[in-house]
Amino acid sequence: MTAPIPARAPVSSYRLQFHAGFTFQDATALLPYLSRLGITECYCSPLLAARSHSPHGYDISDHTRLNPELGSEADFEDFSAALSDHNLGLILDFVPNHMAVDPVSNRWWRDVLENGPSSPYAHFFDIDWDPVKPELMGKILLPILGEQYGVALENGQIQIRFQEGEFSLYYFELNLPLNFRATRVLLRHKLESLEATCGPEDPHLREFLSILFQLDHMPGETETDPALVQECRRERQVAQERLARLVQNSPVIHEQIEQNVQTFNGVPGKPESYDLLHDLLELQPYRLSYWHTAQHEINYRRFFDINDLAGIRMEDPDVFEAAHGLVLRFIRRGVVTGLRLDHVDGLFDPAEYFKQLAENCAGVPPIYAVAEKILSTGEPLRQDWAIHGTTGYDFLNDLNGLFVDSQNAQRFKKLYARFVESDELFFDVVYESKKLIIMTSMASELNMLARELNRISEANRRYRDFTLDSLQEALREVVACFPVYRTYLSPRGWDEFDQKSIDTALARALRRNPAMEASVFRFIREMLLPDNIAGLPPKEYQDRVQFAMKFQQYTGPLQAKGLEDTAFYRHGPLISLNEVGGDPARFGRSPAEFHQANLQRREFWPLTMMATTTHDTKRGEDGRARVNVLSEIPDLWRANLARWARTNAGMRTLLEGKPAPDRSDEYLFYQALLSAWPADAAEEPEPEFVERTLQFMQKAIKEKKLYTSWIRPSEEYDSAMASFVRHALTGSGSKRFLRLFLPFHRRIAWLGMLNSLAQVVLKLSSPGVPDFFQGTELWDLSFVDPDNRRPVDFGRRRCLLEKMEPLLGSSCPDAATAAVEEMLARWQDGRIKLYLTAAGLRLRRKMAALFLEGNYLPLSVAGQNQEHVVAFARNLGAQSIIAVVPRLVARLTGESSLLPVGQEVWKETTIALPAELTEHVYQNVLTHIPVLPAGPSHRYQIPVAAALNVCPVAILRGEREPNSKPASTPPALTIGES
């Protein structure tokens, strides 16, 4: 970790999603509850001005001000003051990679649309002003039309408006600027008639002609010389003000302009009447197009394949300064104490960005910073990044794998293949999914890369024989075979993992394409791992580095779209593994692997975030915990699948001779239903739940992109899916299906609850900063967004926490034991999770040094049921805690409904204590029952039955006995207070 220890080291965080329905005032009112819960940091979604009615805030349109939909500046100041009053820090989600390209609210983008390359903001965006298509030279492709350009034009959907002396273009109600210099074409229309009406001596006419002369002699929109650009901006401002005054003073000229506008706007049914408007549009620095055109011709970098989110060049000092001004002021004032940096894989040079951010924060106490970095299997977080860790997807998947029974991997693979009638490997599904994205929604970016690669090859006689087509095809294969989101080559070089990733991609691409010329892959390797070898012209070396860094910006979004948003919906034997940062081909993790990952976190990233749910996860943490149970009972799962499929066979629709939905969509539906069906639901689903399930399945089949998609929806398949869901849940045959489904669901929900509680304990106790997504202190059974954006009932959570306040403040074992037993008996209401969360968070806050700085000690488990226990300790000086949880409980307890507690279940299973813990005495944090070690002198081991005697999970708090010898302590982290 190269970032300095932050002045305020977070102990825990709570993520809040701000939008027009949840404002600064709402958050301020919530802070007392968060403080009582035990939270130390309020972790906020983006707060800067975003697109109107944004549900998430990631579509920022103005970095210089707060989002007015969230409240006034005074409201924000009140929120900041309340944070301070409750000793809560503020971690702000910041978006450095992209902006919403709303032509009204984003003044930088509007200026670029109006002035093209001559705009002072042209270098803010990643725009290719010299693309393959010559018609786009010096223009931005704007794929905003709902149909072909000519059709939209001749239907009168594109119109000019003249208001308050200014011209604008409207596509329906979307307001676009018109290049003011180009409007002289419209102003000159029928000039002879105006001259005849006014006469040569009319002062208004002379002023009008003078304005036209001024426009004629302004520099064009392709001018980039700074002095001339500034002159042009001054001239344009003067000319616009003169025209505005003129139309106020001359009704004749005003009427002439309005008539010209009406003429240019054409007459529906007369295609030739739109020629004038078309000619004027051809003079603009942008080219309007059908939205489908973006797939192959867009010439600005986007966030993934979203046309109205454009990449910004944060590597440019001007852009960095303009985008960070407000946030840096908040940091210097101490209002913002931490940053979450969104989508850093989109940045040109992430390491340099983190360094620049740290340098700009110089002179103030160091702040906390984490990056949204998704690590692939085996990928390390870069040690040269000036951050404190990731947003926690790596921890999520390490934790989740503990509750997947790896011994059933092959059985699960076979039962899935049999049910879906396909044995395609996930590895191949990812490859095909990525190729689909490359060929469709993100083809434009690959075209630009191939053209740049071709230009480099043409400049070197050793490589000039490679054709553009061959380079494009080879690039396509390399990207489709890329094993990670991206590499991090820079002018400073690359590391061993970068080289390994590139070589892996090239080897896979060559293996899949034996008929392709191998030399083209060798050439690509030289471009992606550029060496400044003797004799290589400096310009060519710089071009190679530039190409490699642009290539890296492409592979990340492509991996996300191909893997997370396509392959995960095509292949899902166990959908709990289909998670952001997850690898469905890796069926489970052992306790030893979990401990090793935690040890590495403690050593290298002790302040990294640990998440189990985020706004981007594919399902809620407790739904995921339920699905994991299936991995333990493949035979029972297979039998239930078969019964349900037979029962619902008549609910599928024949489309072109094949039943719809297909078997993989049906398989997904059953898993999704198990994950999300409310624990306390009645025998029949609520209408709201049916709609939520339907919306999820509609999203799933569109993301899958086999029979329907967002780009080309199939009404027939969409309807077949909707019909299937509705009939299964509410139709005439639903009662029979639900009679079969609900008993199995109740078993899965019960076992899933045990997994959930175990997750909470491990998250609270592991090295790092546990993050709680809003509302997840109770059961979280959400589907993927937008389902996880539903309003949180904070009133209910406040009330429940207030009622258990006496319990949380008590140390009486009898009262605590009775309360825990009662909450477990009524586990469906979620109070047991809330109690565990609050007790653990308060303990963390009270013993912050232990949790942030303490050693991590994996504990050995022995005995008959040792594989069903995960235990570790944290210790620092005289303090320690031991976390103990069960795993794979379905296999442990069989078909019984036994709570995994006590001697009957755990028998002689014991946890061995290392020497540094043998002098400690322990108490269960949840039940306040003392837990006594056993063995020689009663010091060397803890029976699992004693640790898990009432509650199926435990955090044991230890204190060293008086007069015992101090244990060694690790190097300390400094924990500050803001």
Image (cartoon, helix red, strand yellow):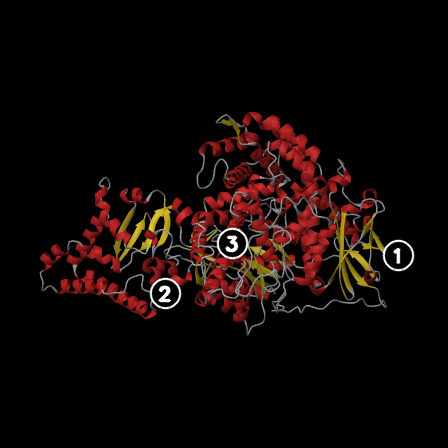
Q: Nearer the viewer, mark 3 or mark 1?
A: 3
Label at residue 803: none
Q: Which residue is mark 3?
A: 524
Category of crowding for the residue at label 1, using alpha-carbon neighbours closer than 10 angstroms: few (below 14), some (14–19), many (at least 20): few
Which image quadrant: the C terminus? bottom right
- Nearest the viewer among 548 and 316 is 548
For the residue marked with disc 1, what is the amino acid? His
For the residue marked with disc 3, what is the amino acid? Ile
Q: Can I make out residue 374 in this image?
A: no
Specify whether 927 is left or right of 249.
Answer: right
Specify whether 853 is left or right of 947.
Answer: left
Q: Nearer the viewer, mark 1 or mark 2?
A: 2
Label 3: element kind = helix
| Residue depicted at 68% across the width and 68% down the height | 973
**Residue 341 locus on image (x, y percent):** 54, 60
Which picture quadrant has residue 890?
top right
Q: Which residue is mark 2?
A: 120
Farthest bottom residue in view? 363
Give the CA distance from mark 2 to mark 3.
35 Å
Q: Which residue is mark 1?
A: 938
Q: Can I make out residue 222 in this image?
A: yes
For the residue marked with disc 2, what is the amino acid? Pro
Please say if 649 is above or below 130.
above
Category of crowding for the residue at label 2, using alpha-carbon neighbours closer than 10 angstroms: few (below 14), some (14–19), many (at least 20): some
N-terminal of the pair, mark 3 or mark 1, is: 3
Which image quadrant: the N terminus? bottom right
- Nearest the viewer among 671 and 438 is 438
**Residue 727 locus on image (x, y percent):** 54, 29
N-terminal of the pair, mark 2 or mark 3, is: 2
